[in-house]
Amino acid sequence: DGGITQSPKYLFRKEGQNVTLSCEQNLNHDAMYWYRQDPGQGLRLIYYSQIVNDFQKGDIAEGYSVSREKKESFPLTVTSAQKNPTAFYLCASSIVAGGPEQPQHFGDGTRLSIL
Amino acid sequence: GIQVEQSPPDLILQEGANSTLRCNFSDSVNNLQWFHQNPWGQLINLFYIPSGTKQNGRLSATTVATERYSLLYISSSQTTDSGVYFCAVLMRTGANSKLTFGKGITLSVRP
């Protein structure tokens, strides 16, 4: 079935450690996105990529890094510079069209906690 | 940046009741999506609605872009409708598109 797969579902990080969250899609979508959700809040954009080997910072990129070496993959690294990483992380993808904007579709998320 | 406000922040319904959820936004947008986040955190697309009215079963949505608001209607609510409903607006600047979310409306449907 076509969709977006995020792994792992739950992740624990020790102080000073970098961790990488995986996001894979088989929808042949051009664009991919990473969002962070804190309790009682909406989603905030961390990074996005509209084409392979290119990505842009969103609203809260500090302490995070990404890569886009393949169309279907957009991993997010939470670095030790991110002082408050405990959150729910959601990955999304969409078609990039020159005409009407296309909807974003979401994975099931990864919950990251600090040990 | 654009502001997205949803109201009411919390809503409690008895099963079978109807409800209207509102989304106001502060600027012109290219598109608007409504999502339902279930208790497990999954974000489900409900509607993709830049303007006009769409219906899907017991749910319908209306966006009046010129007046910068959208409404989500839930009829004959069921306990499985519980969760958080998000409105998100899409703005395109040059080659890039950005989705901005409201803070959500928490709906609890009681049996």
Image: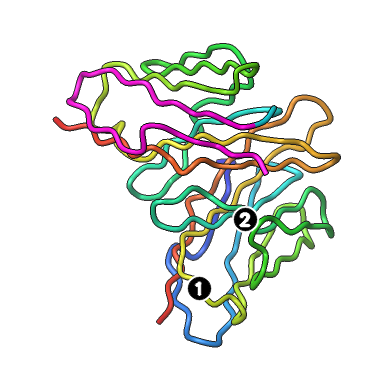
Looking at numbered disc 2 in the image, what kind of residue is underneath it? Trp
- The tag on residue A34 is 2
Q: Position of residue B107 (x, y in %)?
A: 30, 35
Q: Is residue A51 left or right of residue A87?
A: right
Q: Position of residue B37 (x, y in %)?
A: 41, 42
Q: Which residues are magenta?
A: B1-26
**Disc 2 or 1, which lies upstream in sequence?**
2
Classed neighbour count for the residue bearing mark 1: other residues with Cα under 10 Å, few (<14), some (14–19), many (≥20): few
- The tag on residue A84 is 1
Between disc 2 and disc 1, the foreground one is 1
- Answer above or below: position of A19 versus B32: below
Q: Position of residue B2 (x, y in %)?
A: 65, 39
The residue under the point 52% across, 22% down is B70
Classed neighbour count for the residue bearing mark 2: other residues with Cα under 10 Å, few (<14), some (14–19), many (≥20): many
Furthest-bottom residue in view?
Answer: A16
Q: Is residue A46 left or right of residue A50?
A: left
Q: Nearer the viewer, residue A25 or B101?
A: B101
Mark 1 secondary-structure assignment? loop
Q: Position of residue B10 (x, y in %)?
A: 31, 37
- Answer above or below: position of A64 versus B111: below
- Answer above or below: position of B33 versus A51: above
Q: Chain of mark 1?
A: A
Q: Chain of mark 2?
A: A
